[in-house]
Amino acid sequence: MKRPLAALVAALLTTTVASAQSYPGDSGVGVERGIQQLNNSGQVGSVTLFQRDPNTRVAVILHGTIPGRAQSVRVYRGPSCDDLGTAAPTYFLTDMKNGASSTIVKAPESKILSGNYNVVVFSSTAPGAQTTACGHLYAS
């Protein structure tokens, strides 16, 4: 019994490393920022940016989501999650399903991490959905 389990774990680890290094010269390391809950949603997680010159892959992982429910994810211009304003989204990310979203954004990582953008998650994909989580994007 232990041998098949060890083989499965080894296969999963090998697959994970190979998929993370999908671009030539890519170390698979990204820049990670936290996502905080809004409106007492209980949804928290992280957003990780991976440079893909001239683009950026934005991966969002959120805990506390409802399995099977799609949630809109957007990037808004603004100084912080406390001041999102009413402007239109700057970037539309792939809808989150089962707590995960991954999107290639046509902008360099340095622009997205300029301190002028926030990742915002909504309770559903319906118009007027409530915000459930937000993460401010900034350089170290």
Image (cartoon, grey):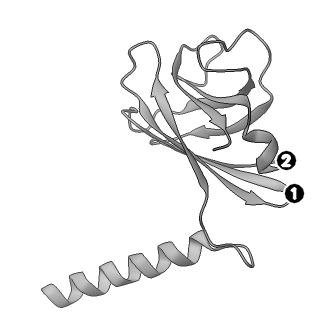
Which amino acid, by three-letter code, is at mark 1?
Answer: Pro
The quarter of the picture where the C terminus appears is top right
Is residue 7 shown left or right of residue 75?
Answer: left
Query: Nearer the N terminus, badge 1 or badge 2?
Result: 1
The quarter of the picture where the N terminus appears is bottom left
Q: Are marks 1 and 2 in contact (CB under 8 Å)?
A: yes
Q: Quick check: 136 above or below 110?
A: above
Q: Secondary structure at mark 2?
A: loop
Q: Quadrant of residue 54?
A: bottom right
Is residue 29 shown left or right of residue 5?
Answer: right
Residue at left 22%, top 81%?
5
For the residues marked 1 and 2, what is the alpha-carbon distance in whole angstroms? Answer: 7 Å
Name the foreground residue: 54 vs 62: 54
Please give the residue where the numbered disc 2 appears in the rendered image.
106
Residue at left 64%, top 21%?
80
Residue at left 63%, top 74%?
21
Which amino acid, by three-letter code, is at mark 2?
Answer: Lys
Please give the residue where the numbered disc 1 appears in the rendered image.
54
Q: Quick check: 70 above or below 21?
A: above
Name the foreground residue: 110 vs 23: 110
Give the class, few, some or many, for how many residues have Cα within 10 Å of label 1's Cα (few <14, many ≥20).
few
